[in-house]
Image: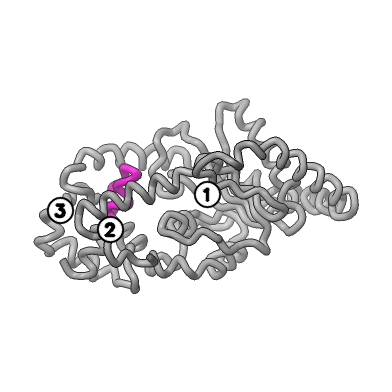
Amino acid sequence: MDAIEAAIIRTVLYADVFHCPLTAAEIHHFLIHDTPVTAAEVNDRLAASPALQQMLICDQGYVARQQRADLIRLRQAREAASLELWPLAQRYGRWLARLPFVRLVALTGALAMRNAASPRDDLDYLLVTTPGRVWLARAFSILLVRLARRQGIEICPNYVLADNRLTQERQDVFIAHEVTQMVPLYGHTLYHQLRAANAWVGAHLPNASGAFYDERELEVGTGWGAVKRLLEWLLAGRMGDALENWEYRRKLRRFAPQLRTPHSAAQLDEDRVKGHFDDHGYSVVREYGARLREHGLLENVPGD
């Protein structure tokens, strides 16, 4: 295999960890390589490479490993479920955008890749807030979580961070994917700042310079915008500082035992709330490495 063929295999193998066959456009966008590659080069290899034809199956617009052709039907079902969920994700994304101090709302997780397990799957979000109000913004979002749960809807704002802490400390292929596959719903300018602060992802995914699904920015509405500004004004001074500190200390005591669990990727400080106490990113990287080893591709992995 040449370098582009190897990159295509790496990309399909990574998606295989999530039982997710990819379209040619997705392979190009999320190509795991060390330099940018054109869509034409990817399409040419998929159509004409004997090596890829031996290892991959292309059917109904999706590409999977030869041994995993059954996943194509699963991906079709998951894509249908994702399309059903998408309007709901936008609806709750708009409500999150209306919360005080929230400046960016991005859809993350399986739904961001149109790979939701069912039409009742969780709605995962990343929130970026103004500095010094991360924990208050999260508290408001938890109220929304509880209201949605009464409707049988599970929304998970499981990563909240301040806009002065946009750079991700862990810099591997898993986090690179998390950054590049998120779908900004509100706060597009800040989304671009987040991407610029994490330019390192280009060493893993050089083609993924923007969001694959580029959604129009949600509007909070004139009335809700006024309510948001009023609440921010009321909570901008000493009372807001006291409430922020109280919520931070309260949650830190509550989650302290979970922070010490093996493979915890949780980050709880004044600027970040990342409640991944049993982070599956470690197992993803391990399973991906096993697939690379199986195909003789473990050496010279981009970004490593």
Q: Amino acid at mark 3?
A: Met
Q: Amino acid at mark 2?
A: Arg
Work out how far the residue at label 3 is from the one at label 2, CA to CA, in angstroms. Answer: 12 Å
Mark 2 and mark 1 residues within 8 Å of each other at the beta carbon: no
Instruction: Label 1, secondary structure: give it.
Output: strand
Task: Specify the farthest residue to the right.
Answer: 238
x, y percentage for residue 157?
A: 60, 43
Q: Quadrant of residue 33?
A: bottom left
Q: Nearer the viewer, residue 114 or 90?
A: 114
Residue drawn at point x = 61 percent, y = 62 percent: 166
The C terminus, quarter of image: bottom left
Question: Residue tagged by mark 2?
Answer: 10
Residue drawn at point x = 17 percent, y = 52 percent: 56
Nearer-N-terminus badge (1/3): 3
Above-or-below relation of 203 to 77? below
Residue drawn at point x = 54 percent, y = 44 percent: 264
Residue drawn at point x = 49 percent, y = 54 percent: 182
Nearer-N-terminus badge (3/2): 2
Tag in front: 2 or 1: 2
Tag in front: 1 or 3: 3
Question: Residue tagged by mark 3?
Answer: 55
x, y percentage for residue 295?
A: 20, 55
Tag of residue 107: 1
Q: Is residue 237 left or right of residue 255?
A: right
Residue range corresponding to the magenta coloring = 12-24
Q: Is residue 186 magenta?
A: no
